[in-house]
Image: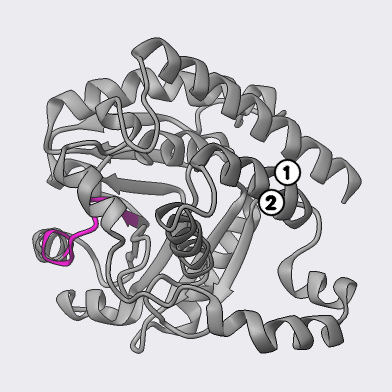
Amino acid sequence: MIRKVALIGLGTMGPGIAARLARGGIDVAAYDSALAAIEWARGMLEMAAGVLDRLGVAAPAAGSGAVSFSGSIEAVVEGADLIIENVPENAEIKASVYRQIDPLIASSVIVASDTSGIPITSLQAHISNPSRFVGMHWSNPPHIIPMIEVIGGEQTAPETVAAIRDLIRSLGLLPVVVKKDVAGFVENRVLYALLREVVDLVERGVIEPEDVDTCVSWGIGYKLAVIGPMALLDMAGLDIYRSVSSFLNADLSNKADVAQLVLDKTGAGKLGIKSGEGIYGYTPERIRELQAERAGKLIAVRRILEDQG
């Protein structure tokens, strides 16, 4: 049974992950090498807890569900049943973390990576007990989005996958077991296929960014929140899909490189909200407004889906 989790690396996702685990009665010891990241996470933890209150996620029993922070990786992994690695999306950085914690943990401890898409098989090669290594991919914001992907590598034991799947279910969340260890898993493969197409359409002058956002959010996005894509095939009719895909698939973007629009923006340091400008421009005030607006809308949509489910 998983009672204590060590969370290594805070970043954008860490506070939400910690808050949601703690709300499920699990003690969380969180580590980051940057003290500034720890201080930022302390503040974000309170905000995430407020969101969970609005979602109606009950507080844990007294004496459980504590979150602590430390600048010592040795201290946070001590006594942990599960370690969640949440460091940047760089295979070598992740490997260095595994090599660091490997001599510190028992062979029974599960090590899970929150990687967004690095194949688990390649990561588990850097730890001495790969059968206890698994992918646990949370979706941002992790304290609101209930779906979590579970991915086993070539050497992951079925019992390890089952343990993480059962943990997610015990939290009242939705585990999705990915049967094959493919890059990007499932969520990001679908997302990046969509992003490749919309960026290509904007680059070609077919549509403005604001209009493609409206098209997706109030068109297919609106439907997909209620009807999954495979169910949508049945609703529309497989004969219709066969007919349209026979000519449309050949015209869809199949670029294998990064779009020039993205290269130009990132080359100029325009990274999005984190830098104040990306596809759109953002003031600090607008960023705070967007965070509150989006959290509120995600909460409202989730309540409706759960109530109607």
Mark 2, Cα crowd under 10 Å, few <14 / some 14-19 / many 20+, is: some
Q: Position of residue 151 (x, y in %)?
A: 45, 74
Q: Position of residue 80 (x, y in %)?
A: 32, 52
Q: Which residues are magenta?
A: 83-94
Q: Position of residue 12 (x, y in %)?
A: 34, 37
Residue 57 seen anywhere in this rendered image of the structure: no
Q: Compared to 13, does 201 lie above or below?
A: below
| Residue displayed at 52% across by 68% down | 163
Residue 137 or residue 80, whichever sits in front: 137
Residue 250 as seen in the image, left or right of residue 285: right
Label 1 sits on a secondary structure element that is: helix
Residue 201 or residue 295, whichever sits in front: 201
Residue 150 as seen in the image, left or right of residue 7: right
Mark 1, Cα crowd under 10 Å, few <14 / some 14-19 / many 20+, is: few
Look at the numbered discs 2 and 1 and tell me whether their residues touch, using CB distance below 8 Å: yes
Q: Within the magenta stretch, is there residue 51?
A: no
Q: Compared to 153, does 8 lie above or below?
A: above
Q: Compared to 222, does 57 lie above or below?
A: above
Mark 2 to mark 1 CA distance (whole Å): 6 Å
In the current view of this chain or complex, which residue is farthest to the top? 285
Amino acid type, callout 2? Gly
Q: Which mark is residue 221?
A: 2
Q: Quadrant of residue 123?
A: bottom left
**Numbered circles on residues, count:** 2
- The residue singled out by tag 1 in the image is 218
Label 2 sits on a secondary structure element that is: helix
